[in-house]
Image: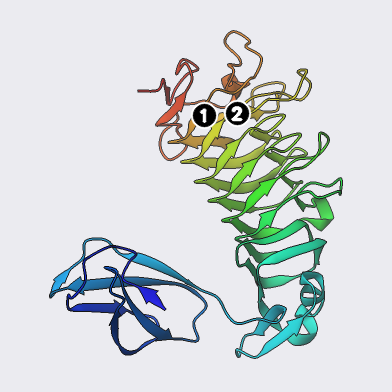
Amino acid sequence: MLHCLGLAVGAGHVVEITTAEGLLLAGVIDNGDATYAQEIETDMVGTALITATVQGLPLEASASLNITPPMDGVLGRDAAGNSFTFATIQAAVDAVGANGLVEILVPPGFYDEIVLLDDVSGLVIEGFPPAVVEGFRLMKCEDVAILNFDIEAGATREHRIHLLGGNKKNVDIVIEGNRISGADVRHSGVVAGRGNTLTLRGNHIFDNGRNGVQFTEVIGGPHLLEGNLIEANGGNGVRVGRNHVVWLVENEIRGNGLAPGRSGGRYGVLRDRSGGRPDPTTVTLRDNVITSNNGRIQAGRSSIDLGNHDQFLNAAPPPAADAGNVTTTGSEGPGVMPPP
């Protein structure tokens, strides 16, 4: 059933509900409490945009309807739309090759598993909230997306999402719309090793004992971190290994560095220090808010928010220049300013 955008528009009106997804059945029902409803029939899974008119006038507001499939377990789909049901996420992943799966849909529930993806390509794994899982571990994967999970630690001592590197590196991995939390003091929310390429978009990464996000070893990327909230982690919000290529765009990175001590850093963003003259354009910051972190201040080198900023803030020609970022003091260098 669809309620008329959740708005109280008064009883007795002529209301028309519209959507581009699925078939609207029968007529609009006046519930008598200033809301209206209509049934929809669809085989789409995802988000449908709902609009309405009242007395022939369009409402300025619209609404999103999340449509989930009826599932008796974890659902796998192949490219032709055929469906298969599995008891666990891991069982579905293990059947990707044999069944030609391109999509795994996970209904709400708690999944006591760290899901291993080994040599998997062309796959979307999507949770329907609250789908809670302990973690994901990827090796030798390509074009894989992990969407909309609540990834919590449970009793395991692992990074919440771990992309192995080197000869097990992963390419074109997307982590989007997840809540990632609860790793212990020796582990981080998301870790990517040497040679990976990763997009992190729209995630809430918080309350991990070590770093929120860490790019380990000396080289990797390009990586994109866009629109994430990274907060209240024990170590750094984001820690970047030397020579990883990373773009941070429109993230909010705040209140990190809560663990005692100083080892490993307590910054919003830390780039591991390099000898010689490192290329500052490998780390690019655009329109981020990075405030109230707890890093060690070192004059001309590190603030509470940006560790080793003298090796990555730059005014290079676009598109490599840092710009539009807010930090607690706004005094670190090019491309940063204090809060308004």
Question: What residue sits right under mark 2 in the picture?
Answer: 268
Q: Secondary structure at mark 1?
A: strand
Q: Position of residue 16 (x, y in %)?
A: 23, 79
From the top left corner, tell me how far across and down residue 152 is, in percent. 73, 50
Residue annotated with mark 1: 290
- Amino acid at the residue labelled 1: Ile
The answer to whether marks 1 and 2 mark residues whose Cβ atoms lie closer than 8 Å is yes
Q: Residue extending furthest left?
A: 56
* 136 relative to 339 in the view: left or right: right
- Above or below: residue 127 compared with residue 198: below
Q: Which amino acid does the dot numbered 2 rest on? A: Gly
Q: Position of residue 181 (x, y in %)?
A: 69, 45
The answer to which image quadrant residue 216 occupies is top right
**Quadrant in which residue 56 is drawn:** bottom left
Q: Is residue 244 above or below residue 258?
A: below
- Residue at figure coordinates x 31%, y 76% from the top left: 31
Count residues near mark 2 (Cα–Cα under 10 Å), then give few for <14, some for 14-19, many for 20+.
many
Mark sitting on residue 161: none
Helix, strand or loop status at disc 2: loop
**Image point (86%, 49%), residue name:** 156
Please tell me which residue is depicted at 28% across the width and 83% down the height of the picture.
28
Q: Nearer the viewer, residue 243 or 22?
A: 22
Asked whether residue 140 appears in the rendered view, the answer is no
Q: Residue farthest to the top?
A: 299
Closer to the chain start, of discs 1 and 2, is 2
Is residue 228 visible to us here?
yes
